[in-house]
Image (spheres, helix red, strand yellow):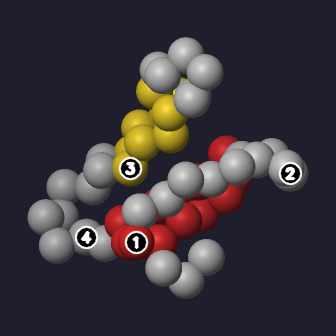
Amino acid sequence: MGIVIDLITRLPVEIWFRENPKASDTNFEKAILNRVEPQTLLLLDRGFYHF
């Protein structure tokens, strides 16, 4: 599961879910990069180690 949260409102902006229990967090890279704009601060866990 991947979630984009607005830090001001603390509400989810977008949620992604994969049914495969062995899916990696890095499967959401393209979706996240398509969502963000320049000068966006990304706070990611260590699952996104190669950004």
Of badges 1 and 3, the one in the foreground is: 1
Of badges 1 and 4, the one in the foreground is: 1
Q: Residues within 10 Å of mark 2 (few under 14, many from 20)?
A: few
Image disc number at residue 4: none
Using the numbered discs, state the Cα–Cα distance from disc 4 to disc 3 in whole angstroms.
11 Å
Which residue is more in the foreground, 12 or 46? Answer: 46
Q: Which sits earlier in the primary sequence, circle 4 or circle 2? A: 4
Q: Secondary structure at mark 3?
A: strand
Q: Secondary structure at mark 4?
A: loop
Quadrant of the image occupied by residue 50 = bottom right
Which residue is disc 2 drawn over?
Answer: 38
Q: Which sits earlier in the primary sequence, circle 2 or circle 1? A: 2
28 shown above or below 12: below
Q: Position of residue 10 (x, y in %)?
A: 48, 22
Which residue is disc 4 drawn over?
Answer: 23
Q: Which sits earlier in the primary sequence, circle 1 or circle 4? A: 4
Of badges 2 and 1, the one in the foreground is: 1
Using the numbered discs, state the Cα–Cα distance from disc 1 to disc 3 in whole angstroms.
13 Å
Using the numbered discs, state the Cα–Cα distance from disc 2 to disc 1 in whole angstroms.
22 Å
Using the numbered discs, state the Cα–Cα distance from disc 3 to disc 2 in whole angstroms.
20 Å
Q: Secondary structure at mark 2?
A: loop
Q: Residue at x 17, y 73 (%)?
A: 22
Q: Is residue 38 left or right of residue 12?
A: right
Q: Position of residue 5 (x, y in %)?
A: 50, 33
Q: Residue at x 47, y 72 (%)?
A: 48
Which residue is more in the foreground, 9 or 37? Answer: 9
Which residue is disc 1 drawn over?
Answer: 46
Callout 2–callout 1 Cβ contact below 8 Å: no
Residue farthest to the top, as pictured: 9
Give the amino acid at mark 2: Pro
Which residue is disc 3 drawn over?
Answer: 2
